[in-house]
Amino acid sequence: MKSIALTGLGIVVGLCAGLAYGAADGDMSTAYRELDRFGEAFAKVRSHYAEQTDDRLLVEYAIGGMMSDLDPHSSYFDPKTFAEMQVKTEGQYGGVGLVISAESGAIKVISPIDDTPAARAGMKAGDDILAIDGETLQGKSLDQVQQKLRGLAGTKVTLTVLRTGEKDSFEVKLVRAAIEVEAVRFHRQGDVGYIRIPAFNERTDEGVQSAVRDLKKQIGPSLKGYIIDLRDDGGGVLDQAIAVSDDFLDGGEIVSTHGRNPRETERFDAHPGDIADGKPIIVLINGGSASASEIVAGALQDHQRARVLGTTSFGKASVQTVIPLNGGEDGALHMTTARYYTPSGRSIQATGIVPDIAVAASDKDADEASQFVESESVLPHHLEAEGAKAVTAPVPLIRPEPGKTYDDFQLSYAVDVLDGKAQAKAVASTANGN
């Protein structure tokens, strides 16, 4: 390491000391050699860059680049971001209500959260955000974009958006609000109980249980079943997905997670007791259904406890862990540490949950391929599925009758299935290995 300046040498020595814990993972001489290369690059940038550099920022940029190039969901939280990161899952945060991802250098909307400024302004899954308040997002990390979207409730923000199928971008003016992502909503749909889960956080399971209790009282003995709406649910807290799945299962595996080390494998099982008393369930999904929502859909589908209706889900079957650096003083790594598998052992990573009943959102869906637009498989550096067969052909969609309009065709069809008015056309799924 003779070519490394003192500061660079200190960084490399510190990194090497940390690597000592993982010495069994491979040839450490290779790791030391690569760290030597990083240290030299750091020292040269520090010495020869056109302007004075900040050592801390250089290291943070390096860590951020390393994490973001691993996969679409790994990232680095700087100290400020790490200090604020618990806000969203603990209740409220000031923002516009968008679940976003980074795709080929662009920021893409996975789903707008219900009843938020973004949803009310007509933002749609698949929209590309090109700029925020006139500042281009070129080169911005996902975490940096999220920070720009957040702010005090009542403050204004303008997004420059490009929508699929349109040539020109347009501006969406929003006023930030306190976003409450935990709200589970429900209502009676005739003799069917409808439950909408917009996201998973600490109070989701409590909301689902309360919804089922109230729907039982409202509908009474004539209750025919439940519709659990997970469309545009971008995910959230893992243990809440497990708890919600457990609510409707009497036993068996819900999900398993497998890390690189076999000793890190975990399996989560359901406990006796089905809060729906065995009543039929239909789960609604689409391309905006990701992560935690796919765990619920996959568990209920594999156990044949529910029929899944809609279009193919997003296909995010990886688990991220937050690992603080220096007790959090130096930020934290938000890193993919495991993959998850449905009860049958299938991976839906980059393939998604294929519905049992494939139903178009509306008659405006141009073709069957449109259901695959929102997918983990199009994100750069995505993890490939393990042991899953590739989708060889689009799933044929059930569509509305020509000339007939619906407020929500998928929901209407689901109600008709539970009422016995529509045929539940099962679709064989190659992606699910069925």
Image (tube, helix red, strand yellow):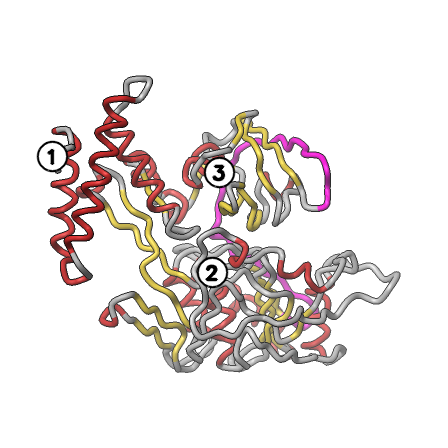
Residue 279, above or below 195: below
Closer to the eye: label 2 or 1: 1
Residue lying at the far top in this picture: please name it: 51
Q: Nearer the viewer, residue 260 or 294?
A: 260
Q: Residues within 10 Å of mark 1 (few under 14, many from 20)?
A: few
**Which percent across, then down, holds residue 3?**
15, 32
Q: Which residue matches tag 2?
A: 316
Secondary element type, mark 2: loop
Three-letter amino acid code of the residue under disc 2? Lys
Q: Earlier in the sequence, mark 2 or mark 1?
A: 1
**What's the residue at 19%, 61% (across, down)?**
26
**Which percent across, then down, holds residue 303?**
49, 81
Residue 27, above or below 254: above
Q: Which residue matches tag 1?
A: 2
Q: Earlier in the sequence, mark 3 or mark 2?
A: 3
Q: Is residue 304 magenta?
A: no
Three-letter amino acid code of the residue under disc 3? Ala
Which numbered disc covers residue 361? none
Q: Which residue matches tag 3?
A: 178
Q: Nearer the viewer, residue 370 or 119?
A: 370
**What's the residue at 60%, 41% (across, down)?**
128
Compared across the picture, whether 189 is left or right of 354 comes to right
Pick the quarter of the image with the C terminus: bottom right
Q: Which residues are magenta?
A: 165-192
